[in-house]
Image (cartoon, helix red, strand yellow):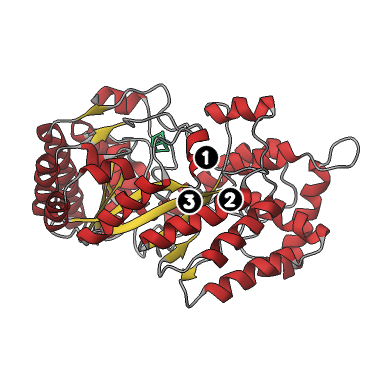
Amino acid sequence: MWLNSILRPVPTRIIPPITSARLPSSSFDFLPTIKPVAVITSAMIPIVRLATSIFTFRKAKVKPAASASIFPYFPLTCYNLNMVSLSFELGLIRPPSEAYSLLIRATRNCPWNRCKFCRTYKGEKFSLRTVEEIKQDIAKAKAVQDRIMELAQKQGDSIASAAAAVYNSAFDPAVRNVALWMYAGGESAFLQDANSLIMKAGDLVQVLSFLKDTFPSIHRVTTYARSHTATKKTPEELAELREAGLSRIHIGLETGYDPLLQYMDKGVTAAVHIAGGRKVKESGISLSEYVILGLGGEKLWREHATETARVLNEIDPDFIRVRTLTVTGSMPLHEELESGSFIRASDERIIEEERLLIKSLTCRSHFVSDHVTNLLQEVEGKLPEDKERMLAVIDRFLALSSEEKTSFKIGRRLGIYTSLDDLDDSARRRAVAENINRLRNGNGLLDDKKLYALMEGFI
Ligand code: SF4
């Protein structure tokens, strides 16, 4: 498995480059912001992304933190080679909010693995890991941490600077994971993969206790789980997990509309979502529910919005996190899209759907839009007090002229705009206009497929 982690480098979405001395906010996703450039075509996006990565990589080498020049650490390559034996397993993904968490793989892949809109673990077999295996990984992470601390001491530099230098020169994903986590202050951990609650509660308690004992600086430990699995845990087991240090569970609710849950083969009903979510909340563990905007497509957007709001109102999670549907070739939904049985909703429709969802929410959750696929990432706030402000952002988008909407959609997908206010920036507007001309087909029309490809290029 060690060899496997070397041969199959973790995608950059797991570990973003360190781009500046100040860490980005929690809404930072896995890609560096693409600066406005004169002309970007969809075919150039991978090149732009590569160039931007190189730019940020070089920039980070020069000044990732106040005094983190890589040169005092030369030759770090040899140093990092010494850490190869400390490599440990990593899973494929983590939530955007866990970009700077220490990643520890508790189980491998997804025990359900049937959702039509998900490609993450397709073709991979689920397996449990033993407590001993997981503890060994934690011990290796500790050894990497010790090496980085020694290095900082030897150089008379800060831990953050030493961590940044190791991060920028290491090739091993696990070593980089520890370095990035240390650079960010070392306060949180995320247990991978898709459903850690499937472990026996006693085993998970042992892992959590060992993790907290090994790293006293960790104040927050979070993980993914399925609602169905949460319903199988007793209140006492969930309380034990909370006491052992499990602070938050991220659940993929996706939708609260039963026919859509069935169509997407999510393997749960709205009632199970409510039961699982409530159980987590009642245990005192923080709960984050993920919703996929656009999941109902053009046909079911209203039902998706209203039923999802109903289920969320019944759960009242601490966080509601939205991301937007993407459809790539490796998802079963792709075939349905090709055959015409699933009709994708337009960006405008998805924003209408988001409006209906927020309007129908009566819970007291934090609404978070921290995924790069979302058109309006600025629609965020605490419910109910920020509801009107969030709706006003949506209404501002819906009131744009068709030309402005097109500019915003493409500018966001190219990373040129981040918020609606950027439409007032004439340099950005010009850059987007030049790109729009390049995205038009022979009839002068914009091809939706090209627009979707821009969004999907980011995941
Ligand atoms: S349960 Fe989660 S990880 Fe598993 S297939 Fe569904 S969406 Fe993907």
For the residues labelled 1 and 3, say whether their Cβ atoms are less than 8 Å apart. no
Question: Does residue 448 appear to the left or right of 82 in the view shown?
Answer: right
On the image, the x and y values in percent for residue 240 come to 11, 53
Judging by the rendered image, the residue that carries numbered circle 1 is 259
Residue type at numbered disc 1: Pro
Q: Nearer the viewer, residue 388 or 55?
A: 388
For the residues labelled 1 and 2, say whether their Cβ atoms are less than 8 Å apart. yes
| Label 3: element kind | strand
Residue 124 seen anywhere in this rendered image of the structure: yes
| Label 2: element kind | helix
Q: Nearer the viewer, residue 128 or 186?
A: 128
C-alpha distance separating marks 2 and 3:
14 Å
Q: Residue at x 63, y 73 (%)?
A: 392
Mark closer to the observer (2, 3):
2
Judging by the rendered image, the residue that carries numbered circle 3 is 291
Ligand 1 is located in which of the four quadrants? Answer: top left
In the rendered image, the residue lying farthest to the bottom is: 385
Q: Residue at x 70, y 47 (%)?
A: 346
The local crowd at label 3, few if under 14, some if 14 to 19, many if 20 or more residues have their Cα within 10 Å, is: many
Which of marks 3 and 2 precedes in the sequence?
A: 3
Judging by the rendered image, the residue that carries numbered circle 2 is 303
Residue type at numbered disc 2: Glu
On the image, the x and y values in percent for residue 301 come to 62, 49
Position of 383 relative to 227 (above/below): below
Q: Is mark 3 within 8 Å of ligand 1?
A: no
